[in-house]
Amino acid sequence: ASGTFPGLAQLTADVLAALRKGVPGASEAAKEVLLVGGSAQFVNFKARLQASVTELAAETLGKRAKVHFAKDRRHS
C-alpha cells in the first residue's frame, strides 16, 4: 500500500537479492545495519532475526549470515 514501509524481512530479502544479482553498492548496504529501539527491543528479537536472516541468505546466496547485536551504539 502507498505510504507504508516494508518490514525488516522484506528489506533483508531485497538486499540479499541485490547481492546475488551483483547490484553495485549492495555489498556496502549489507555490511552493517543498525537497528535502534522499536522492534529491536522485543523479546526473542535477536533469535527470530537471526533465524530469518540465515534462512533468507541460504535461499538467496547459498551462504550463512550472522547477526551481531550491541546493546548500545558505541560509535558513529
Image (cartoon, rainbow, N blue to C red):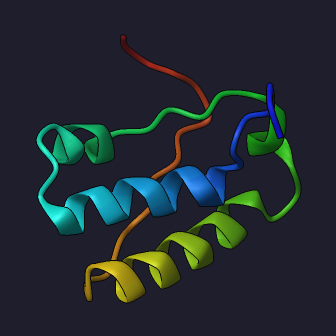
Q: Please state which of residues 36 and 74 is positioned toward the viewer in this rendering.
A: 36
Q: Please state which of residues 24 and 48 is positioned toward the viewer in this rendering.
A: 24
Image height of 74 relative to 44, above or below: above
Q: Is 4 positioned to the left or the right of 32 in the image?
A: right
Residue at screen point 60% across, 57% down: 10
Q: Quadrant of the C terminus?
A: top left
Which picture quadrant has residue 58? bottom left
Q: Please state which of residues 21 and 61 is positioned toward the viewer in this rendering.
A: 21
Q: Quadrant of the N terminus?
A: top right
In the rendered image, residue 41, in percent from the top left (x then y), is placed at: 81, 42
Which picture quadrant has residue 62? bottom left
In the rendered image, residue 4, in percent from the top left (x then y), is placed at: 80, 33
Q: Is 52 positioned to the left or the right of 5 in the image?
A: left
Q: Please state which of residues 7 and 1 is positioned toward the viewer in this rendering.
A: 1
Q: Residue furthest right?
A: 43
Q: Is 11 positioned to the left or the right of 66 in the image?
A: right
Residue at screen point 50% across, 84% down: 55
In the rendered image, residue 69, in percent from the top left (x then y), is placed at: 52, 48
In the rendered image, residue 57, in percent from the top left (x then y), is placed at: 38, 76
Count up the numbered dots.
0
Residue at screen point 35% across, 80% down: 60
Q: Residue furthest front?
A: 2
Residue at screen point 60% across, 79% down: 51
